[in-house]
Image (cartoon, grey):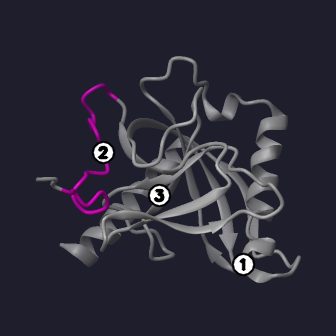
Amino acid sequence: MILLMNLLHHLPAYHDRFESGEDKVNAVIEIQEGASAKYEYDEVGEVFRLDRFLPNGLRFPINYGFVPETLAPDGDAVDILVHSSQPIERGTVVSVRVTGILRMTDDGETDDKVIAVPHCDSDSESFLDLSPERIRCLVEFFEIYKRKSLTGSEVPVTKVDGFRSAKDGLRAIEESRLRYRADFD
């Protein structure tokens, strides 16, 4: 018999909180770096569903997922971008260290993305230590990846508002955990 676990509701947000002096957050990967298909976790069906294909050969420049037991202002789990030396497969749970947050809006609503690196990846540098070209690539991707795939026009629906600190990223997770508990406990 195969037992399924709901990755949003039965996996804690924190892996080893305070054990090592820093918060280890759990990240569930929905889309691996280099993918051209956007998947989303379906909490009811407990499966990853294909949402859409990215237009014009675009590929995700970073591993993309969510933090379990969180509820962001947009009504979804907190989005997380996991920078690693290798692509991470969909469905993998990764213990990560938060290094910042990408502030952005999607169709006028807040849609921030926490930035993190895996604890087990000694080759991953802090996101904030990345080259300006790599950061520019991420900003450009998140400003254009929805244009034709959703709206059929070149009108921007997403806007990057800059990067903030690891402390801001952890604060966003904690606020979303409180929101989650208020809705689901």
Number of the label disc, if any, that sits on residue 177: none
Q: Nearer the viewer, residue 149 or 138?
A: 149
Work out which quarter of the rendered image holds the C terminus and state it.
bottom left
Q: Earlier in the sequence, mark 2 or mark 3?
A: 2
Q: Nearer the viewer, residue 90 or 73?
A: 90
Q: Quadrant of residue 37?
A: bottom right
Q: Which residue is painted at 39% across and 43% down in the image?
A: 92
Apparent side of residue 77 relative to residue 131 in the rendered image (left or right):
left
Q: Position of residue 19 (x, y in %)?
A: 24, 29
Q: Which residue is painted at 43% across and 27% down in the image?
A: 119
Q: Position of residue 174 (x, y in %)?
A: 37, 56
Q: Earlier in the sequence, mark 2 or mark 1?
A: 2
Apparent side of residue 18 relative to residue 2 in the rendered image (left or right):
right
Number of the label disc, if any, that sits on residue 172: 3
Q: Position of residue 100 (x, y in %)?
A: 58, 44
Q: Is residue 17 magenta?
A: yes
Query: How far separated are the C-alphas under marks 1 and 3?
Result: 27 Å
Residue type of the residue flagged with mark 3: Ala
Q: Which residue is painted at 58% across and 24% down in the image?
A: 124
Query: Measured along the vertical axis of the image, is residue 170 above or below residue 158?
Result: above
Q: Magenta region, mostly helix, strand or loop?
A: loop
Which residues are drawn in magenta?
4-21
Q: Nearer the viewer, residue 93 or 21?
A: 93
Residue type of the residue flagged with mark 2: Tyr
Query: How far separated are the C-alphas under marks 2 and 3?
Result: 13 Å
Q: Residues within 10 Å of mark 2 (few under 14, many from 20)?
A: some
Query: Which residue is label 1 attached to?
Result: 150
